Image (cartoon, rainbow, N blue to C red):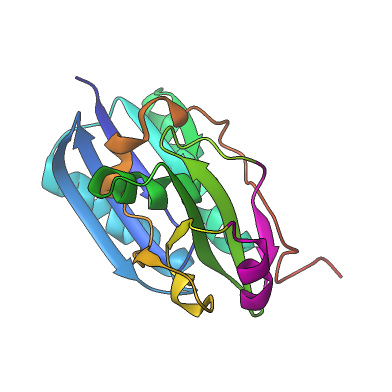
Amino acid sequence: MTLALVIDTALAAQSLALLDGTTVVASRHGIIGRGHAEALMPALAALLDEAGATPGRILVDVGPGSFTGLRIGIAAARALGLAWNVPVTGYASLALIAAPVFAAHADTRLAVVAEAGRGLLYAQLLDRDLVGDAEPVALDAAGVAVWLPAAVALAGPGAARVPGARVLAGAWPGARDAHLLGGTAVLPPVPLYISAPDAVAA
């Protein structure tokens, strides 16, 4: 089995893992908000030192997520992929949130919701194959309540903000769960932006 490095900086959580199949060789996970730029490389160095091995592939969260978080994580993944001459592929942040929830519950469909900043939430309907009914949207909490189909449960950070919703889990995406993504972790390592970036060129 090829050792996989997983880098997730799309949202407020910075989550890293080295996976050998379903086995977590090493991992780091913390909620750091906007501190990805300063914290990522030291955390990666510590993770790789702990494992003492070079990964054979890299998985990176491509969004939806913050402009800065996505850019930092994807740039690091690409640079390491070039340095090690290993493939780099992406996965969707909302799929990684949904994967462990589907593994723990019998629901066949979930609405996955994550904080998008500026009072908005990213939202997407996913089935058990982690395939979306449509592209993710960015709505306020009241808008998500209107958008949400009847009887569909919510998962993800920000789900508790949606009035009247049945919330199964509120966790941020965790890199250690990336083995649950199956064949969906094959996206190109380019960012998926849903709402406008916080910073724009003058």
Spot occupied by residue 105 in the image (x, y as percentages of width and height): 27, 49
Residue 159 appears in the rendering: yes
Relative placement, left or right, of 84 versus 154 is: left
Q: Quadrant of the C terminus?
A: bottom right
Q: Is 8 located above or below residue 4 in the figure? A: below
Spot occupied by residue 82 in the image (x, y as percentages of width and height): 46, 29
Q: Please give the name of the residue rendered at 59% of the width and 58% of the height, measured from the top-left corner.
A: 123
Relative placement, left or right, of 33 versus 54 is: right
Q: Please give the name of the residue rendered at 44% of the width and 76% of the height, measured from the top-left corner.
A: 160
**Is residue 145 one of those drawn in magenta?**
yes
Q: Quadrant of residue 197?
A: bottom right
**Is residue 9 one of those drawn in magenta?**
no
Of the pair 164 and 11, the residue shown nearer to us: 164
Q: Is 128 located above or below residue 84 in the figure? A: below
Chain part drawn in magenta: 134-149
Q: Please give the name of the residue rendered at 44% of the width and 59% of the height, measured from the top-left corner.
A: 153
